[in-house]
Image (cartoon, coloured by chain):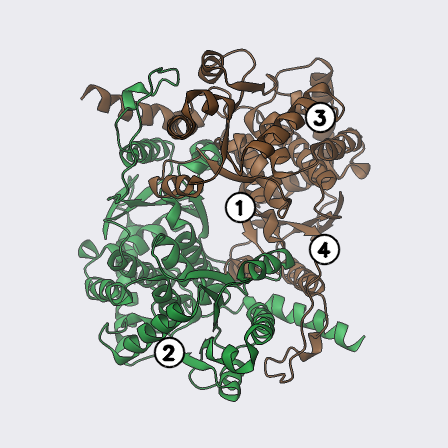
Chain colours: A green, B brown
Amino acid sequence: MFISTLGLAGFNTAEYAKLRLELEVAHAKLVEGDRKSQDNLGWMQPLDPDDEQVGKIIAAAEQIRRDADVLLVIGAGGSYLGARAGIEMLAGRSGTEILFLGHHLCTANLKEVFAKLKGRRVAVNVVSKSGTTLEPAIAFRLARRWMIDQYGVEEATRRIYVTTDPEKGALLAMAKKNGYKSFSIPERVGGRYSVLTVAGLLPMAVHGADIREMLRGAQEAARLYTNPRLEANTCYQYAVYRNFWYRNGKSIELLAGYDTRLRTLSDWWQQLFAESEGKDGKGIFPAVVQLTTDLHSVGQYIQQGPRHLLQTVLWVKQSDLNVTLPEMEDDLDGLGYLTGQDLHEINKRAFLGALTAHTNGGVPNVVLHLPDLTEQTIGHMFYFFMKACAVSSLLLGVNPFDQPGVEAYKRQMFHLLEERRTS
Amino acid sequence: MFISTLGLAGFNTAEYAKLRLELEVAHAKLVEGDRKSQDNLGWMQPLDPDDEQVGKIIAAAEQIRRDADVLLVIGAGGSYLGARAGIEMLAGRSGTEILFLGHHLCTANLKEVFAKLKGRRVAVNVVSKSGTTLEPAIAFRLARRWMIDQYGVEEATRRIYVTTDPEKGALLAMAKKNGYKSFSIPERVGGRYSVLTVAGLLPMAVHGADIREMLRGAQEAARLYTNPRLEANTCYQYAVYRNFWYRNGKSIELLAGYDTRLRTLSDWWQQLFAESEGKDGKGIFPAVVQLTTDLHSVGQYIQQGPRHLLQTVLWVKQSDLNVTLPEMEDDLDGLGYLTGQDLHEINKRAFLGALTAHTNGGVPNVVLHLPDLTEQTIGHMFYFFMKACAVSSLLLGVNPFDQPGVEAYKRQMFHLLEERRTS
């Protein structure tokens, strides 16, 4: 992945030299941890595309594509964002339609999703390490009820796929008791680093993604981004860059995509960085903008608000879709000079124009140039961000792999739910 | 709208007393400006539901509903976010389907939207004050071409509705020359304050919204929120509250909705506040979270990241949709104690639990309690936020109604586009 940085005045400072030294420590820590097969580092070695497990995932996906018009994927946070991101980036594949549930408690959306299932052949894939996270557990109970009412116990069982912990948990117990087909999320991979495991791969394969290609992209990235030399490692550059700016007063990072298919990838990125870094009173706030759309929204703030922002732009170089501006006899809209031009070229001018304007306005920008939105690039990008996030968190001085703050609301919520039980 | 604030320790300070005095000035300025019919204050007096203009909008909407299965609404920023917000909050109405275009330059999305038009009866509503904003101008050219190819010039003309400036601009000229039906956005209303004009009302009416009820809600809000007494004016309370915290180190405001139908309302709110306040190096960064979804994403950061956040929660009290947790013979998911409970009640426990946890974690919270998601409440809420934003911007010491920073990228972009023309 090609990376270019702008607004780097002041980068050759003592702070930067310090960051380089810290990077060496972080790099050594990850290499050593990987060698020792430490907990939480299972994502560092992506699955081999020729692994037997990959074949099993593809076979299950093919079965689902034969059996179902819709696959209902149930999961929260890292258990669905990666799959959804991949599926949205690969929009237009001819696979089974994928619908997502189990990440909220909104009745309106639940009703809407179940209404879409009516009259169609349905399969379910529930993704949860514990099986006791409230939202997916509730959605799965509703889905099981619906499937049993629709198909009877036996056929419903055949259509339910469980992705969960290999050793323990409520969902594993349920799968065993009821005879659901089950897949294991590797023990050494946490939720937000699980997109390239069966958690993300199975739904993406059902959508029609070539997951072997995706894993090839991730493997290539894994090779490239073990290079300890900062100059040769764009992933480390990104991690150093954002920490440099964090230490120099930037507290918000905007991820800006110029392609609407990048929407959920941005949400996945936001979860990855917010949960990995947002602790001990530290962390850049990761926010998402969609451009050019939000040039007419947050754009004013980016240009002239407080200078606490940095911006990371995702630019997809090649467009496989040709839309040109048609000719009109009258030229009352004043667009005549753009007639016959490809819209992607016009989008590119908007991207370059905003980049210059925002940089001049005092917002440091980094551009991640994606060659295209194919499986290989997507796999590469997933890996790029996960490794960058792990390194970045280590530079920040926090644990990239825990989320102790998430327990706080759960305690309060379960306390209130329990109260209702006894009242 | 009922409002409750939490985490107010330290509110009785000199800063707060100062804000009260500044509020009096801001209030007087808006009252005086409204009396003098000043520029940009046209939104302060919502349309009378019995106004002749409202009748015309409803008649046009009825015509579109008879003629079309799909209405393509073309607009950017304030020209589509309000309509889209209203339509999403009123999901499930039986009107004509509304699709949005013209707010970006992404070819993938353009192709997707045009693919959805195939074989269906289509009408177009283009919304733009100038007619020269690049994205909607391009989308409208594509749409005109499509409509003419589909229907021929005469019938295409009958199916195109233009919402634009009453006096000037490229779009007005085009409407006159081609004989498109046209509606006027009042001159004294800027784009991000235009949701309760024809810009927002026509698409919402086509969706099946009772826009007279919406205007009744807005009128009620206009009456309520002219009260100069802070204690009696929740709209002013919200404006004072956020400025108080801004002056006390909070630089990011999260708008958190617990209902998926509030997604675009949040985007509309973000545009309103970002463009109104983000200038002169000032302004709270408005960010959007969807809960409970993002408790599994940004939640960790909210709980334990830097304490520069405040959170505004939208809670819809009444759910008109009953979904209860079904019984299952096995209780392997451990949810047995919630069997038979309404999901909205469980969502409420999550909301209250997160509220306590985040407040305890040092994030000030304010809750805006919406009784329901009916037209009246929605109209009330739109007005609440617009007035709060105007007052809040005045407290911040910036002009709530201009957007000088938006010109910066446009200059750069048009420069690049012009280069192509001459090269």
Closest to the camera, between mark 4 and mark 1, is: 4
Tell me, for residue B46, which label it has, or none: 3
Say what secondary structure mark 4 lies in: loop
Chain on which label 2 sits: A
Sequence-wise, the earlier of marks 4 and 1 is: 1
Say what secondary structure mark 1 lies in: strand
Measured in 3D between alpha carbons, the distance from the residue under mark 2 to the one under mark 1, in whole angstroms, is: 34 Å
Tell me, for residue B319, which label it has, or none: 4
> Both on one chain, marks 2 and 1?
no
Say what secondary structure mark 3 lies in: loop
* Mark 2 lies on residue: A186
Does residue B318 lie above or below A176 as drawn?
above
Measured in 3D between alpha carbons, the distance from the residue under mark 3 to the one under mark 1, in whole angstroms, is: 28 Å
Closest to the camera, between mark 2 and mark 4, is: 4
| Amino acid marked by disc 4 | Ser
Measured in 3D between alpha carbons, the distance from the residue under mark 2 to the one under mark 4, in whole angstroms, is: 40 Å
| Amino acid marked by disc 2 | Pro
Sequence-wise, the earlier of marks 3 and 4 is: 3
User: Residue B238: image x %, image y %?
Assistant: 69, 40
* Mark 1 lies on residue: B287
User: Residue A276: image x %, image y %?
Assistant: 43, 63
Sequence-wise, the earlier of marks 3 and 1 is: 3
Chain on which label 3 sits: B
- Is residue A320 among the parts visible in the rendering? yes
> Both on one chain, marks 4 and 1?
yes
Tell me the quarter of the image containing the C terminus of chain B. Answer: top left
User: Residue A45: image x %, image y %?
Assistant: 27, 72
Say what secondary structure mark 2 lies in: loop
Measured in 3D between alpha carbons, the distance from the residue under mark 2 to the one under mark 3, in whole angstroms, is: 58 Å
